[in-house]
Amino acid sequence: MTPQQINLVQDTFNMVAPIAEQAAALFYDRLFTLDPSLRPMFHGDMTEQGRKLMATLALAVSGLNQPEKIIPAVQHLGRKHVAYGVQPEHYDIVGEALLWTLGQGLGDAFTVETEEAWTAAYMMLANVMEGAAAAVAG
């Protein structure tokens, strides 16, 4: 990621943070619309699940300037997701739901450059998670 992309992701995340609860609800609604088979992976209070999602995103986004500091946590998350039944193909669906959600939350601020920056950030994080998951599952 370029420094400009990192700044764009961080700036736009700060725009979404005030509507974190609604953004999380939009994300999960979109995720389950894209792939209803994922719904059974989520148990309990979805509002709390949404809070965890947004907290995890906040940690990842804030650490994009120094990825070496967040990689261990991202790897741990990838390993944890194996136990939930997450498969490699699910990462693309999650990415699609995330980008759609950002588009809804940011409106006109979700420019082509913003989408490219978020795609780069998500791909970097997803690749780290998938690598860690593959080491566990392999």
Image (tube, rainbow, N blue to C red):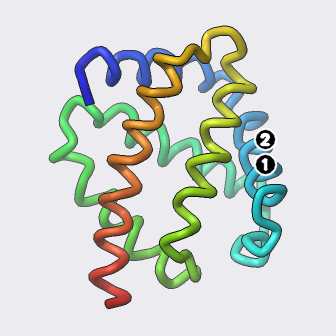
Image side of residue 108 versus residue 7, left or right: right
The tag on residue 26 is 2
Residue 48, horizontal then vertical, whole percent: 70, 55
Q: Amino acid at mark 1?
A: Arg
Location of the N terminus by quadrant is top left
Q: Nearer the viewer, residue 68 or 134?
A: 134
On the image, which quarter does residue 23 sit in?
Answer: top right
> In the figure, 123 relative to 128: above or below?
above
Location of the C terminus by quadrant is bottom left
> In the figure, 27 relative to 23: above or below?
below
Residue 14, horizontal then vertical, whole percent: 52, 19
Residue 15, horizontal then vertical, whole percent: 59, 16
Read off the residue under disc 1.
Answer: 30
On the image, which quarter does residue 8 sit in?
Answer: top left
Q: Nearer the viewer, residue 87 or 7?
A: 87
**Circles 1 and 2 in contact, beta carbons < 8 Å:** yes
Outermost residue on the top side: it is: 108
Q: Residue at x 72, y 45 (%)?
A: 27
Element assignment for label 1: helix
Q: Residue at x 73, y 37 (%)?
A: 21
